[in-house]
Amino acid sequence: MKTSLTRTQWALIVILAFAAAPYVIRLGASSLWDSNEAFYAETPREMIESQDYINPTFNFRPRLNKPPLSYWMVVPFYKSLGISEAVERLAIACGAMIIIATAYGLGHVVFSVEAGLLAAIGLAAAPRFLMFSRRIMIDVYLAMFMTLALLMFMLAERRPDRRRLFLILMYTFIGLGVMTKGPVAMVLPIAALVIYLAVYRQFNRLRELMPATGLVIVAAIVLPWYVSIYYQHGWSHIETFILKDNLSRYTQQLWGPRRGFFFYVPVMFGDFFPWSLFLIPCSWLAARRIWTGKGQPGSQARSSVLLAIWIIVIVAFFSFSKSKEDLYILPIYPAAAALVGGALASFIGGKPDRKTLLRLTTLMLAALIAAAGVVILYLFSIRIQPYELAGARLAALLNRPRSAVLATAITLAACNWMFVLWTLPDFERFKPVHSACEVITSLAGPDALAGYYKTAYPSMVFYLRRPIFEYYEQGAIEAAFSSGKEIFCMMTAVEYEGIKARLPAQTRLLASYPIFQVKLKSILERVELPQVVLISNKGGTTSTQ
């Protein structure tokens, strides 16, 4: 029997379309982000150039620190639409759209159609999720496969008559996740499901998960590539990936600032703001359901507990890791969105058991958004040229408290539109690589060497279509400029001042570019922007941007 959509549901669909549109517009309006995006834009291009899809390379050197699926996902887009930033980002946007759809699926399956739509709107309107979906290929696809696996388990619980089909799909998505970023895509979903069964003392149901079948499915997806790598290179590359890029990163701090155990608490709050505030009442409700033992397998009560367990397991796992990055917990946000969507749907529906708690949360949300508007206006409303970004003044919309959830979603979606249409294109003046590579291309001969010194601009290889050097020792850069070859090098102005006396006399400054200083103290004190310079031993006209 068909049921027609209600006016509320139609309104939510329109808002969802408005919130989702920024994910696919003006994808080519900004150059690549260094450093992560460069790897997932250039490696597929090199695969196509070399016709080798088994051995990924970056900068024309082996890059076997990750499985290749995230590169493979971009290849058909490049072959169909051409090689460009926009096409690479279209591949990411497709993954983001599937994640948003998965948030809808989780909210719908666990709660209601309205909850699913609110979950999708909340995730689509979250500014940080939009930013991730414009630059981070591998983590978006990892989150996509992991949350699709979660959705398949939810469907298996709700539809016992089709359990086998949904579990086969679940293990398929787990296998694809492993081919995206390694064993973590299998360890975390299985851990969440086992803990979920343990909470309700149902270990006898482990056999229902078809573990032997699942292992065969995952192995069938993963092993062919690993066997091929072993056949070509032996065990060394596989050992390096498993031990160095997985275990070592987890047990040792290999890079970046030292981050404490509770690093992910503010990350979760900020990345999913403002909806993260609603996780507080949602957590309280989930804890109450565990305490009372309410619900049968597949019920709303138990399914919402599983969503909470999913979030806790992922955050706890990475909290114990010595190396921490905010993107590691991206797979929690569809589950968080589903929980929030369910809470908001009950709030809008006026259910008395949650109404008071959610009203207080909404009031707190309005106050924080107003405070955020005040801070943004203070930081960016004064017209100091180095820090002025187009569209920043329009963030004043945030200083008007929104008591209605839908008004908040529309406001955030509108801010995302401003970010995509004005702020991102305007930010290009703080991204020097594309402009510098145009200068290099106009001057460099076929045998010229180009690269960077004591900085990180790997996207140069994408724009130059040639290998680049990466020097971090003073002796290496001195030797390069003494080699007699044409050299084009990017470095900070500070480094150039310190080293130019040691470089050959014919070295000259070709261009200088400002880079954005993302430090609150520097913004407050209106510190002059640092500069990156392009130098060469070949003539040119000095320019400053």
Image (cartoon, rainbow, N blue to C red):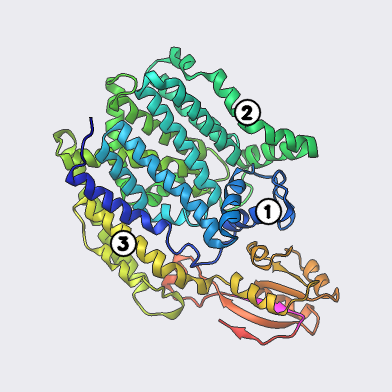
Based on the picture, tell me whether residue 536 belongs to the magenta stretch.
Answer: yes
Q: Quadrant of residue 392?
A: bottom left
The residue tagged 2 is 220
The disc at residue 48 is 1
Of labels 2 and 3, earlier in sequence is 2
Based on the picture, tell me whether residue 73 belongs to the magenta stretch.
Answer: no
Image coords of residue 261 (percent x, y): 49, 42
Answer yes or no: is residue 493 visible.
no
Task: Please name whichever residue, 7 or 320, is drawn nearer the observer in this view of the structure.
Answer: 7
Mark 1 or 2: in front is 1
**What residue lies at 81% left-to-right and 81% top-to-bottom?**
504
Dot 1 alpha-carbon crowd within 10 angstroms: few under 14, some 14 to 19, many 20 or more: some
Image coords of residue 130 (percent x, y): 42, 55
Q: Could you tell me the amino acid type at mark 3?
A: Ala
- Secondary structure of the residue carrying numbered label 3: helix
Callout 2–callout 3 Cβ contact below 8 Å = no
- Secondary structure of the residue carrying numbered label 1: helix
Q: Give the residues in magenta.
A: 532-538
Q: Could you tell me the amino acid type at mark 1?
A: Ile
